[in-house]
Image (spheres, helix red, strand yellow):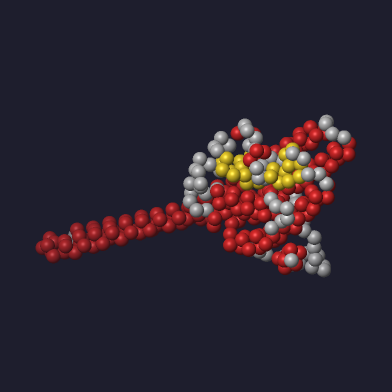
């Protein structure tokens, strides 16, 4: 059932003369995703510039409105004094009506611009955090993994060392899978998941954990959960990024099993470094705050973590 379902979900782009293609290999340095994120940042900047132009146009219209009102009041002042008693109540009524209309227009414009600015600022904040995470993530993981593999090589036989090197490559591929498949997939759905501004980063972190638990946290990948739950979270079942993620996750699990050593993807926070400065935390979190839950698991081989987990920290207790 798993293979049949995956084939049904596979996108059918025109790739090659025959229409069939193999899943694209993950770019280990995240250039593809980084370029897309930077392009979206540019588009958001254009939207912000357009909103500024709209505000300038509104200000010009209000200035013209004030000039017209001044001309009207000047004309009224020239009316014959004998008519003042009859005209004055009407003048005051016109003046009140104009003032009320101007206030209503300004209030409406202010509310509209506030909503539009908020719709631009929130995605920009999220994209900036994602760009920073993509730029620093792979380099940090590679350095940490090389240090751990070098330490293992000094204490093990040639055969065991080679097998651990293979697991080291699997750990690096897992980190690349997280950065290039899982994070972009959830980033597209994050604005719909946010419940409030105070904890706006938490829903995305929770969804990432759920996806990784379904794919790596069990003896077998729980593709049924993926098929039923992700569409409810705003991720279509036929999304091309989701399809690549599922294929690559299953291949990664098979590679890990074929090497033959005891291994797991652990969500236990005992693999989180005790020193806050050495922790990898979710975007928007502070390393010194209490750990709420593990977002990305550690890849552990024979009781040693080859990759560091990512944690969500918060002062708000749920």
Q: Residue at x 79, y 68 (%)?
A: 19
Instruction: Give coordinates of residue 17: x percent, y percent.
Output: 82, 67
Residue 231 shown left or right of residue 299 in the figure: left
Residue 189 shown left or right of residue 238 in the figure: left
Quarter occupied by residue 299: top right
Residue 80 visible in the shown view: no
Instruction: Give coordinates of residue 50: x percent, y percent.
Output: 51, 55
Q: Residue at x 47, y 55 (%)?
A: 116
Query: Considering depth in this image, is 165 or 67 the residue closer to the camera?
Result: 165
Q: Is residue 36 above or below residue 240?
A: above
Q: Is residue 145 above or below residue 24?
A: above
Q: Residue furthest right?
A: 158
Q: Is residue 31 above or below residue 103?
A: above
Residue 42 shown left or right of residue 69 in the figure: right
Viewport quadrant of the N terminus: bottom right
Residue 204 visible in the shown view: yes
Quarter occupied by residue 275: top right
């Amino acid at each position: 059932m798993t293979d049949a379902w995956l084939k049904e979900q596979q996108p059918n782009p025109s790739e090659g003369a025959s229409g069939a293609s193999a899943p694209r290999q993950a770019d280990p340095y995240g250039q593809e995703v980084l370029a897309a994120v930077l392009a979206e940042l540019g588009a958001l900047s254009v939207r912000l510039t357009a909103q500024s132009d709209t505000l300038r146009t509104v200000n010009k219209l209000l200035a013209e409105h004030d000039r017209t009102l001044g001309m009207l009041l000047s004309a009224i002042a020239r009316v014959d004094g004998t008519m003042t008693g009859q005209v004055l109540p009407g003048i005051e009524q016109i003046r009140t009506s104009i003032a009320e209309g101007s206030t209503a227009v300004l209030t409406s414009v202010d509310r509209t611009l506030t909503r539009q600015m908020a719709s631009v600022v929130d995605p920009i904040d999220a994209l900036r955090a994602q760009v920073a995470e993509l730029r620093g993530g792979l380099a940090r993981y590679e350095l940490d993994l090389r240090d751990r593999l070098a330490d293992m090589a000094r204490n093990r036989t040639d055969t065991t060392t080679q097998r651990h090197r293979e697991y080291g490559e699997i750990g690096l591929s897992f980190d690349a899978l997280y950065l290039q498949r899982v994070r972009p997939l959830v980033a597209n759905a994050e604005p719909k998941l946010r419940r409030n501004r105070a904890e706006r980063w938490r829903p995305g972190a929770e969804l990432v954990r759920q996806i990784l638990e379904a794919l790596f946290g069990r003896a077998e990948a729980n593709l049924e959960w993926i098929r039923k739950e992700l569409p409810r979270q705003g991720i279509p079942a036929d999304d091309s990024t989701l399809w690549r993620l599922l294929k690559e996750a299953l291949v990664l699990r098979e590679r890990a099993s074929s090497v033959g050593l005891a291994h797991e993807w652990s969500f236990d926070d005992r693999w989180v470094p005790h020193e806050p400065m050495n922790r990898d935390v979710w975007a928007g979190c502070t390393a010194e705050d209490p750990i709420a839950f593990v977002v990305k698991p550690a890849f552990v081989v024979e009781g040693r973590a080859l990759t560091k987990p990512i944690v969500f920290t918060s002062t708000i207790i749920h």
